[in-house]
Image: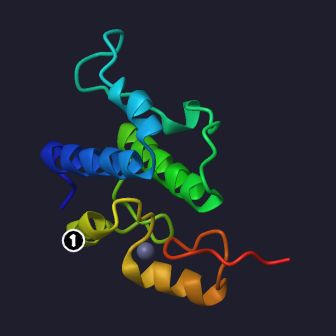
Amino acid sequence: MPLTTEQLEQLREQLVAEGEKLGAHVRDVVGHGADPHGDAGDCSASLAGAEFAFGLEEHEHELLQEIDSALKRIEAGTYGVCHECGEEIPLARLNALPTARCDADCQERLDRESPGGPTAGRGPVFAKR
Ligand SMILES: [Zn+2]
């Protein structure tokens, strides 16, 4: 079942709230998502456009990028589809992890193939030399 507009909207709000938690500064950017120039419902808020100049930790920086790319996927209509196998990601997983690009199976496989790799979507990423 594809996500309904309502479900997408809820997930989008979750992502935006997540971004806000990372730093009050983000609020300014996200808060302007409802730009008068944009069409209603076409929220083109982009965290990436928000120059990460406010000294975020690298980890937070990465998270924000995850959030931003998830928001972009929502805009592009590709959100909620597994990046790897093209299957729909279960809503329960999206609710738990709105930035998920893959379903649990693929994520697990990816984690196994590249432990600590750039696609590790959870926990601290251990820097490799
Ligand atoms: Zn998959």
Identify which residue is drawn at 28% across, 72% down: 93
Residue 96, compared with residue 81, is above or below; it is below
Which residue has dot 1 on it? 92
Quadrant into which the C terminus falls: bottom right
The amino acid type of the residue labelled 1 equals Ala
Q: Which residue lies furthest to the bottom in this view?
A: 112
Would residue 29 be found to the left or right of residue 1 on screen? right
Percent position of residue 118, x then y: 65, 69
Q: Which colour scheme is used?
A: rainbow
Would residue 2 be found to the left or right of residue 24 on screen? left
Percent position of residue 64, x then y: 51, 50
Please tell me which residue lies in front, 98 or 78. Answer: 98
Q: Residue furthest top?
A: 37
Q: Quadrant of ligand 1?
A: bottom left
Q: How many marks?
A: 1
Picture quadrant of residue 91: bottom left
Percent position of residue 115, x then y: 64, 85
Would residue 55 be found to the left or right of residue 41 on screen? right
Picture quadrant of residue 89: bottom left
Please tell me which residue lies in front, 91 or 77. Answer: 91
Identify which residue is drawn at 49% across, 48% down: 69
Please tell me which residue lies in front, 103 or 28. Answer: 28
